[in-house]
């Protein structure tokens, strides 16, 4: 049976969600099958229903010229394309057609060339992303061309959302059943202008998306990088994998970005690591005691425990690569080779410096090996990406991390590596461990505010042209709950969320309240009853993680499409020098595995 295609008006969107929910398939094999209906029937909450922004129907594929809006009538826009990944799979089906856009609004249709998804099938248990041979982007033009303050909006006539993916529709239906209403990104205005807001917290990222959507060569010469810092909520990859997939679907992909030579633990998928590896010991900034060496921006390094320790990466047509390594005393050399031929060797000096080795990759190369020629070599990461435009999301999350523990990133490495990545968006998923440590009385709200302020100022000082967004923690329950008894919300959760929001907005960053978006108090209990929480009642699983990723990506895309329609209230920030870090964080504990 096929869900009938209906209009995405407010009334009919609810009908679509109900119909799609009735056909919702079971979870993948690693997740228990749905146990709906819940023991206590779900009652529609007083909050607004889940929101999926209106999207227009895809246009026919082809190489026909795309119509221009009046502002671009004199400039040709060529279709965008990207090299297909060797691991991409496509069944040749595109996104289902949506409903017509409001007839009152003129529509400019843009049809993009076929672009396969930049997906990695090795992600353990991930939901299959739909094949995406064509992205049809509809641009709904506001004939008024003004925001609510009567000022002309330079973006209202340009931005519009891509149609939802099949996975997105399934997750929307799941969100409806779990009473997860979604939410909007708070994007404070930093520089009011004569025609509205000249610059908001997310303007640098949204401007980069504009360039990708329009194909403007002056904006899209390089990949649009997102640097995602956070705790284990993202370190397992699935949430950021969904965010990455949704953005790549709408704007194209430019490769995998920052990778690790091995996993952070003996288990888990390899979507962000070497495909095969052996002989490495991982050290992370989330450990109970501070490891012997400080960290780079990955928050992880791998030490060769034997000669010939190796990490092997499958290449996908990347023209060059970068090796990040630490020059520690008595460490052996590292060799970089492709298909058996050595491309580069490091020459350690033993001075403890953070070093970078770049290398060109021959056309047609299939496998890249990073090999330690002796014990003790330290690898911080490997960068592999395409030359052209597209989205790259660097997953930099670490289990047990909080803003305080990110003090273990060495200043020289932070400056060198973050400047190399030149992100357009600094994305922070924090707050879960902070709220738990507040409950344990191992920190306080003043420390939470101080250390998040320091982290934001420190990273933004290195990357001043980046947008900044803080994503608050998900719902959480109190430690010491008794099995079979009602779950009790973690006592300091909402205080931690309020503190993070306060700091983010004061520092000129956007904020997304994931707790509210997933349904607020009681939402974790609903996720758990539906089979989407691990037994620890801390970590989501399966499509529960995917839904959280969809909530974040939907909010980002809605924020991009809506920016300029409303003038956000102006904010001022002292932009003072970052406060001193409280030591190296060695007093922190790692009991929390979030």
Image: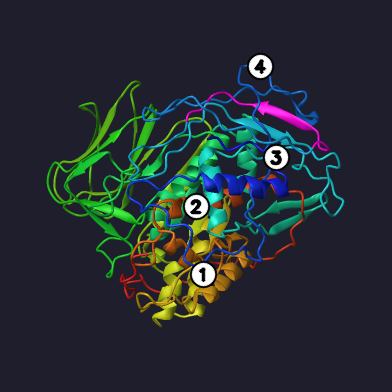
Q: Between label 4 and label 2, give the one nearer the viewer.
A: 2
Which residue is drawn at the image coordinates 77% and 53% (left, top)?
566
Contact, mark 4 vs mark 2 (Cβ under 8 Å) = no
* Disc nearer the start of the sequence (1/4): 4
Q: What numbered label is drawn on residue 522?
A: 1
Residue 31's spot in the image, x, y percent?
A: 36, 52
Depicted 36 relative to depicted 503: above or below:
above
Residue 64's tag is: 4
Marks 1 and 3 in Cβ contact (< 8 Å): no
* Mark 1 or mark 2: whose residue is earlier in sequence: 1
Residue drawn 31% across the image and 70% down it: 590
| Frontmost residue, 413 versus 16 | 16
Q: Is residue 59 magenta?
A: no
Q: Is residue 46 left or right of residue 20?
A: right
Asked if labels 4 and 1 touch by Cβ distance under 8 angstroms, the answer is no
The region drawn magenta spans 103-116
Name the residue that disc number 3 marks. Answer: 7
Query: Crowding near pointer 3: few (<14 within 10 Å), some, many (20+)?
Result: some
Q: Quickly name the residue at label 2.
A: 547
């Amino acid at each position: 049976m096929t869900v009938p295609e209906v209009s995405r008006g407010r009334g009919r969107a609810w009908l679509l969600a109900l119909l799609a929910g009735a056909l919702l398939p079971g979870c993948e094999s690693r997740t228990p099958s749905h146990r709906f209906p819940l023991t206590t029937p779900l009652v529609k909450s007083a909050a607004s229903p889940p929101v999926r922004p209106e999207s227009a129907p895809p246009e026919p594929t082809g190489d026909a010229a795309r119509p221009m809006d009046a502002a671009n009538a004199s400039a040709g826009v060529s279709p965008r394309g990207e090299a297909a990944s060797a691991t991409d799979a496509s069944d040749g089906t595109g996104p289902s057609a949506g409903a017509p856009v409001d007839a009152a609004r003129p529509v400019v249709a843009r049809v993009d060339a076929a672009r396969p998804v930049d997906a990695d099938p090795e992600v353990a248990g991930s939901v299959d992303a739909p094949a995406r041979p064509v992205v049809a982007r509809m641009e709904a033009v506001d004939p008024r061309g003004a925001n609510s303050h009567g000022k002309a909006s330079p973006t209202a006539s340009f931005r519009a959302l891509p149609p939802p993916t099949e996975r997105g529709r399934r997750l929307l239906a799941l969100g409806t059943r779990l009473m997860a209403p979604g939410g909007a990104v708070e994007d404070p205005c930093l520089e009011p202008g004569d025609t509205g807001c000249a610059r908001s917290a997310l303007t640098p990222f949204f401007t980069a998306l504009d360039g990708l959507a329009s194909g403007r060569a002056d904006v899209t010469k390089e990949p649009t990088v997102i640097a995602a810092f956070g705790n284990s909520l993202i370190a397992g990859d699935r949430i950021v994998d969904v965010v990455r997939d949704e953005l790549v679907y709408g704007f194209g992909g430019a490769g995998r970005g920052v990778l690790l030579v091995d996993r952070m633990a003996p288990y888990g998928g390899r979507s962000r690591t070497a495909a095969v590896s052996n002989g490495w010991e991982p050290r992370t900034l989330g450990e109970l005691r501070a490891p012997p060496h400080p960290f780079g921006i990955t928050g992880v390094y791998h030490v060769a425990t034997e000669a010939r320790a190796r990490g092997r990466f499958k290449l996908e047509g990347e023209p060059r690569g970068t090796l990040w390594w630490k020059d520690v005393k008595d460490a052996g050399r590292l060799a970089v080779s492709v298909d058996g031929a050595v491309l580069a060797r490091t020459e350690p000096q033993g001075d403890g410096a953070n070093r970078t080795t770049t290398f060109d990759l021959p056309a047609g190369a299939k496998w890249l090996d990073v090999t330690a020629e002796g014990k003790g070599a330290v690898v911080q990461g490997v960068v592999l990406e395409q030359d052209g435009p597209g989205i790259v999301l660097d997953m930099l999350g670490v289990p047990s991390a909080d803003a305080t523990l990110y003090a273990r990133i060495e200043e020289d490495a932070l400056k060198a590596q973050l400047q190399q990545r030149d992100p357009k968006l600094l994305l922070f998923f924090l707050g879960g461990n902070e709220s738990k440590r507040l409950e344990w009385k191992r920190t306080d709200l003043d420390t939470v505010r101080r250390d998040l302020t320091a982290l934001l100022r420190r990273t933004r000082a290195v990357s001043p042209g980046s947008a900044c967004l803080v994503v608050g923690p998900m719902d959480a329950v109190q430690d010491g709950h008794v099995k079979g008894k009602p779950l009790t919300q973690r006592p300091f959760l909402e205080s931690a969320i309020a503190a993070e929001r306060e700091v983010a907005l004061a520092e000129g960053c956007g904020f997304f309240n994931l707790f509210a978006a997933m349904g607020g108090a009681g939402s974790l209990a609903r996720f758990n009853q539906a089979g989407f929480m691990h037994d620890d009642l801390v970590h989501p699983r399966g499509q529960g993680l995917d839904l959280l990723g969809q909530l974040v990506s939907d909010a980002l895309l809605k924020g991009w499409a809506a920016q300029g329609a409303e003038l956000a209230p102006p904010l001022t920030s002292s932009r003072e020098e970052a406060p001193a870090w409280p030591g190296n964080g060695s007093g922190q504990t790692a009991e929390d595995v979030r």
